[in-house]
Structures are given as structure tokens and as C-alpha cells.
């Protein structure tokens, strides 16, 4: 009887200690989990679980003591029910999921990581192919192709507003411009942020996805020209052109034919290309000549 009562008190004190989240120092083996694993054990949750189990065992033991002290079978029956129920609860709870295991926030399952790697490899391959295609085209030709892409997208998305038309004409004029400083100053007036893009270009009626796509295309088309002017070299136009082409392709927009743009070679004028009238690229009937 005294031993049972002492056990009940020990269980109660242990439950009060663990249920407050303490006692993790007793779980030394859990500290051996490698830091580079895919997660970690939540020691506080484990301690609270142990405290709750000890509390149930303490309750069962107290009921046992009451049954022995007052010779009441009902208390003895309840104590057995608490003990058996606690044991079943432990078995079911611990074997129905990762109760105390927490994945790292940056953890990526292998299947997802493999898919991402495959997509990345495919995108790198696509970028390389686009770079090979545009590597022989002059800066003027690349900017003109960006204008043709944006023009195609604006028509497909019914976004040929007056302001968009002004910007497209400015892009096309890059093919014949001589004074780049003046052109760049005009181009900077069209630089905007996503939050103000639709209001400036009069696109409030478009779906949000379409607005975002047009904003990205407009930005890349602008960068294809202005990055080269800022750096003073012809090579900086290639990366935004690649991004622009991939945006068109990923969103199912038709890409303009390359033939008219190949007529402006990277060998001309140190890579910039000889000045040409926009119709030199715009007139797609040149393909059949």
C-alpha cells in the first residue's frame, strides 16, 4: 500500500516536471541526430508527452490505492482501465505518424529535388540554344526582335493601348537611331514598377497574370537596349533577350520568325549592327524573297 502510494507520488512529480517541457537533458540520445539530416526531434513535445503519460499512470496508481484502502472494486477496475488505456494510447499514438519529428524549413523531398533538377537542366539547355541562335544577330536585331515579341504579346492579350503603342514605336526606332543618349533618355521615361505598370500603360482591365507577363516582357525588352548603352558593350543585350524569349515560350505565345533579324549581323559596326529602318525587320514578307 505504501509502496503504491509512493509510486503514485513519484509519477505525479515526474509528470509535473516533464509536462512543463523540461527533462530534455534526460533524452541524450536525441541530441545525436546529425545537423545535416532532413529535420530534428521536438524535445519539448516529447517531454510534454512523457509528462502526460506519467500523469495517467499516477491517476491509475492513485485509483489502485483508493481501491485497496476502501476495499472498493470499482476503483480497482478504473485503475486497470486507466493503465490499459494508457498503454494502448501510447502504442497507437507512437505508431501512427511522425509525432515528434519536424522537417527543416528548407528541406526538399528527393522526388521534388529531382524534378527541379530536371527542369533546371532543361531550362539551361533551352538558354544555350537561344544564345546560339541570337549569338550571330546584332544588338539592333536583338532589340527589334524584343519589340516584335512584345508587339505579338500585346496583340494576343488585347493590350495594344496608346501608351503601349508609343513604347513599341520607341523600341522599333532603336534600329535606326544614331544619337543613343537621346534615345536612352526617352526610354527611361517608360521604366516603371509592377505596381504602377498597368495604370501607366492603361491596362487596368487585364487579368493580373496578363499584367505581370506584359510587365516582364516590357522590362526585358527595355533592358535588352539600355543595358548595352549603360555598359558601352554589345554583349549585355543577350541575357535579357534570352529571358524574353523564354517568357514567350513558357506562356504559349507565338514567337516571331527569326529570318528578318538574321539580316543584321553581329559582324556589323562592332556588334551593334548598321542603322536600319524598322521596316527592314518589320516587313516579314522579306522571308519569301
Image (cartoon, rainbow, N blue to C red):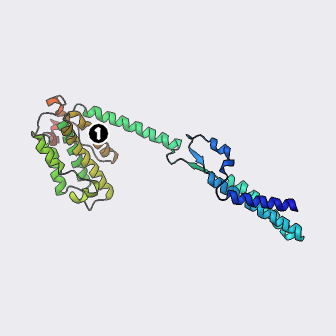
Q: Is residue 29 left or right of residue 234?
A: right
The x and y percentages for residue 196 are 25, 57
What residue is pinned by disc 1?
242
Q: Which residue is outermost to the top?
A: 267
The x and y percentages for residue 252 are 32, 47
Q: What residue is at 25 percent from the left and 32 percent from the top?
A: 135
Q: What residue is at 86 percent from the left and 68 percent from the top?
A: 67
Residues 22 and 199: in front is 22
Whether residue 278 is visible to the viewer of this picture, yes or no, is no
Q: What residue is at 17 percent from the left and 41 percent from the top?
A: 284
- Residue 224: name its quadrant: top left
- Residue 250: name its quadrant: top left
Q: Is residue 47 left or right of residue 127?
A: right
Whether residue 73 is visible to the viewer of this picture, yes or no, is yes
Q: Is residue 101 left or right of residue 145?
A: right
| Location of the C terminus (image quadrant) | top left
Say if 55 sits above or below 156 in the image: below
Q: Which residue is outermost to the right?
A: 71
| Location of the N terminus (image quadrant) | bottom right
The x and y percentages for residue 246 are 32, 42
Q: Is residue 20 left or right of residue 149?
A: right
- Mark 1: few, some, or many residues within 10 Å (few <14, many ≥20)? many
Amino acid at each position: 500500500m505504501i509502496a503504491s502510494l509512493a509510486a503514485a507520488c513519484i509519477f505525479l512529480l515526474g509528470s509535473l516536471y516533464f509536462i512543463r517541457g523540461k527533462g530534455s537533458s534526460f533524452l541524450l540520445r536525441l541530441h545525436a541526430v546529425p545537423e545535416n539530416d532532413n529535420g530534428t526531434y521536438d524535445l519539448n513535445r516529447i517531454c510534454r508527452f512523457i509528462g502526460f503519460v506519467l500523469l495517467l499512470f499516477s491517476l491509475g496508481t492513485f485509483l489502485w490505492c483508493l481501491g485497496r484502502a476502501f476495499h472498493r472494486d470499482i476503483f480497482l477496475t478504473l485503475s486497470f482501465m486507466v493503465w490499459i488505456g494508457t498503454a494502448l494510447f501510447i502504442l497507437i499514438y507512437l505508431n501512427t505518424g511522425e509525432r515528434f519529428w519536424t522537417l527543416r524549413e528548407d528541406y526538399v523531398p528527393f522526388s521534388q529535388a529531382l524534378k527541379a533538377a530536371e527542369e533546371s537542366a532543361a531550362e539551361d539547355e533551352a538558354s544555350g540554344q537561344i544564345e546560339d541562335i541570337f549569338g550571330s544577330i546584332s544588338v539592333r536585331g536583338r532589340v527589334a526582335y524584343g519589340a516584335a515579341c512584345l508587339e505579338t504579346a500585346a496583340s494576343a492579350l488585347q493590350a495594344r493601348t496608346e501608351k503601349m503603342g508609343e513604347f513599341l514605336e520607341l523600341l522599333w526606332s532603336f534600329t535606326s537611331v544614331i544619337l543613343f543618349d537621346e534615345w536612352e533618355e526617352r526610354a527611361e521615361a517608360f521604366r516603371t514598377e509592377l505596381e504602377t505598370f498597368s495604370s501607366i500603360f492603361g491596362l487596368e482591365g487585364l487579368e493580373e497574370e496578363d499584367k505581370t507577363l506584359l510587365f516582364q516582357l516590357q522590362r526585358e525588352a527595355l533592358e535588352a537596349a539600355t543595358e548595352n548603352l549603360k555598359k558601352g558593350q554589345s554583349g549585355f543585350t543577350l541575357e535579357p533577350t534570352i529571358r524574353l524569349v523564354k517568357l514567350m515560350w513558357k506562356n504559349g505565345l507565338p514567337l516571331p520568325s527569326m529570318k528578318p533579324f538574321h539580316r543584321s549581323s553581329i559582324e556589323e559596326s562592332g556588334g551593334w549592327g548598321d542603322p536600319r529602318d524598322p521596316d527592314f525587320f518589320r516587313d516579314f514578307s522579306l522571308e519569301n524573297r
